[in-house]
Each structure stands twice: as C-alpha cells, then as structure tokens.
Image (cartoon, rainbow, N blue to C red):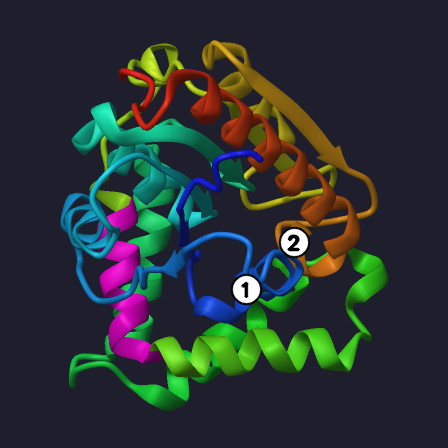
Amino acid sequence: MNHATPLLLLPGLMNDARVWSPLTTAIAGERPVHVAPTHLHDSIAESAREAIAAVPAGAFAVAGFSLGGYVAQEVCRQAGDRIAGLGLLDTGARADTEDVKQSRQRMIQAVEGGEGADPATFAQVAQGFAARIVHASRLQDRELLHLLFDMASTVGSEGFVRQQRAAMNRVDMRDLLPRVHAPAVVICGREDQVTPFSLSQEMASLLPDAELVAVAEAGHMSILERPAMVVGALVRWLGRVDDAAGRRGSGAAAV
C-alpha cells in the first residue's frame, strides 16, 4: 500500500478553501489535507511560515493556486527538507514587474479609498475580475460566478489588500525551482490571462521532475472551470508523490 503523503493546499487571490473543493472532495479520507488561508498576512513569507506550522511533523506535499502558488514556492524555500511534492496551478515564479506593481497599487488605493478598506468598492473590483479570470465560455455560468464572488466576499476588502501587498513584494523564485527534487506538476488554463501559460512552461522547464498540463478551454480558474481534468492531473501527481515517498521511507526530497 502506498504511503499517503499529507497535503497542504493554498488558495489564490480572493479565494478561500472552496477553490480546492473539486480536489478535496475527490480525495476525501485518503490522506491528511490542510487548506491554509492566504489572506491573513501582507507577506508571502509570513503566510508560508503559518501554513508550515499547521502541517504535522514530517514530509508533506504542497500545492498552490495563483497567489497560493507564490506561497507554495516560499514553503519550499522555508521547509525544503520536508517537501515531498510540489503542485503549481495558474501561477508563476517571477516577481512582479513595475507595471504590475503599479496596477496592484491602484487596486489597493481604489479599495481603501482613503478611509480604510471600502467593502462597496471591493465588491465592484471583485465583480469586475470575472471577465479576466474565467474563459469566455463560462461568463454566463451563474453558479461559478456566484462562487467566485462569495469567496471574494469571505476574503473581504482588508484580506484582498493584504494579498495584493504580499504579491507585489514577493521575490523571484526561479532560482529555487531547480532545487526542488520532488515530483511536481504545473497546471494552467490555456487561455489564462492573469498568469499566462508561458509562465507555467517556464516553471516546468526549471523543475527537475515536473509534468506540465495545459487545460483546454479554461482561463485562470482552471480547477473550477475544468475540474475533472485538473483533479485528474493532481491525483496523478499525488500518486507519483506517494510512490516516491514509499521508496525513500518517511524522508522528503532535499530542496
């Protein structure tokens, strides 16, 4: 019987644990799973530290979606001797460009409005994201759009501001990825406008043992837009992680 490696999951910008529900439902009961929030700190490093502290001692796999992918890579930096596998979904390894930083700052200013975080303005920002983060074919999917807005509402305007500040101040992770000697999977929607597929190709090329998965007819929210394909790729990856863990006992790959 394969070793069932514990799994740490990290949501993206304006997401809560529900963004991972297609996977957590599919693998319920088969392994310890912890979904750590990414909206409580304005630092990627601090979010990573808190997430690591919530995982039981020993080796674990980590997967991050979007902003959670930045945190997942920082988890690998901080807990390299414990990493049994890395999953990166619709994310990137590069630091923000100055243009992107300025765009994030404008969103922060719009939401804060000079009087602290403004929920009404944040609601407008959250609703406006839909056209950018889902494939054109899903723009009339009311159930999906409602879930996205409800998750954003849960994160809230203050959580959104913290996430944006964390993202804009993150470091470039491309130097880290070649040192992640553990099974990896890199998944991205083919039509992702937020973190284009080219960024996933770059990450996969840097990782020593990575499968690259392009999700057809999907935008940035690939795991919710095409759950069957994404969950299939993640389950395949977890099988590789468990097999590798079984071969080496309870140790993790060195990072």
Q: In the image, is 32 to the left or to the right of 169? A: right
Classify residue 61 as left or right of residue 233.
Answer: left
Q: Which residue is mark 1?
A: 19
**234 in the magenta segment:** no
Residue 62 x %, y %: 40, 41
Near mark 2 (Cα within 10 A), the count class, few <14, some 14-19 or many ≥20, is: many
- Disc 2, SS: helix
Q: At 75% from the left edge and 49% from the top edge, which residue is drawn?
A: 218
Q: Nearer the viewer, residue 35 or 143?
A: 35
| Quadrant assignment, res 164 | bottom left
Dot 2 or dot 1, earlier in sequence: 1
Give, as a three-letter code, the residue at label 1.
Val
Amino acid carrying label 2: it is Ile
Magenta-tinted stretch: 156-167
Q: Residue 129: which quarter of the image?
A: bottom right
Q: Is residue 92 left or right of residue 158?
A: right
Which residue corresponds to the image point at 73% horizontal and 32% vertical from the top-left? 214
Q: Is residue 181 above or below residue 125?
A: above
State the separation of the CA atoms marked 2 and 1. Answer: 7 Å
Image vertical order of residue 44 relative to residue 119, above or below: above
Question: Mark 2 = which residue?
Answer: 223
The image quadrant that residue 178 belongs to is: top left
Q: Residue 53 appears at what percent x and percent y?
A: 16, 52
